[in-house]
Image (spheres, grey):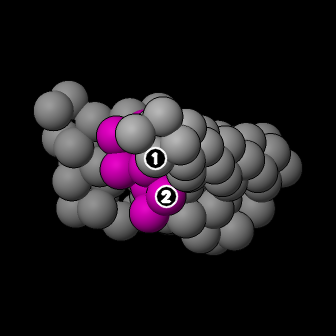
Amino acid sequence: MGILSAFRRRVDSSVTVSAVTYYEKGSAYSANKDIYRAIDQFTLAIRHDNKLTDAYIKRGEAFSITGDYDKAIEDYERARY
């Protein structure tokens, strides 16, 4: 059982690292006003960890900048729950 637990922790950890990496790349793109690439990176972060609320918030902000307010609202609502 110990080996399985270690494997699961490793998989969970790699998922989180990937999500955080994509989130950080999205933040960098957003800071450089490359909004569509930022959205892509935040989306990848969410795919890797759908509980990463900061990614929903930042993607919502990016959608707001593009004028896609419906998607922005969806992301803000997801971030609340």
| Residue lying furthest front | 1
> What residue is shown at x 63% (from left), y 62% (from top)?
41
Residue 64 screen position, x and y as percent: 42, 52
Horizontal side of 81 relative to 46 (left or right) equals left
Is 7 drawn above or below residue 34 in the view shown?
above
Circle on res. 61: none
Image quarter where the C terminus lies is top left
Where disc 1 sits, the SS reads: helix
Reply yes or no: does residue 48 show up in magenta: yes
Q: Residue at x 46, y 46 (%)?
A: 4
Circle 1 residue: 4
Q: How many marks?
A: 2
Residue type, numbered disc 1? Leu
Q: Which residues are magenta?
A: 46-52
- Decide if residue 80 is on the left or right side of residue 49: left
Q: Vertically, is 75 above or below 2?
A: below
Question: Which amino acid, mark 2?
Answer: His
Left/right placement of residue 55 relative to residue 70 reads right
Q: Earlier in the sequence, mark 1 or mark 2?
A: 1
Q: Position of residue 39 (x, y in %)?
A: 56, 63
Query: Which quadrant of the view contains residue 47?
Result: bottom left
Residue 81 against residue 62 in the figure, above or below: above
Instruction: Find residue 5 and report its horizontal and vertical position in percent.
Output: 45, 38
* SS at badge 2: helix
Percent position of residue 42, x then y: 55, 56
Query: Is the Cβ of the residue at disc 1 closer than 8 Å to that at disc 2?
Result: no
Q: Mark 2 sits on what residue? A: 48
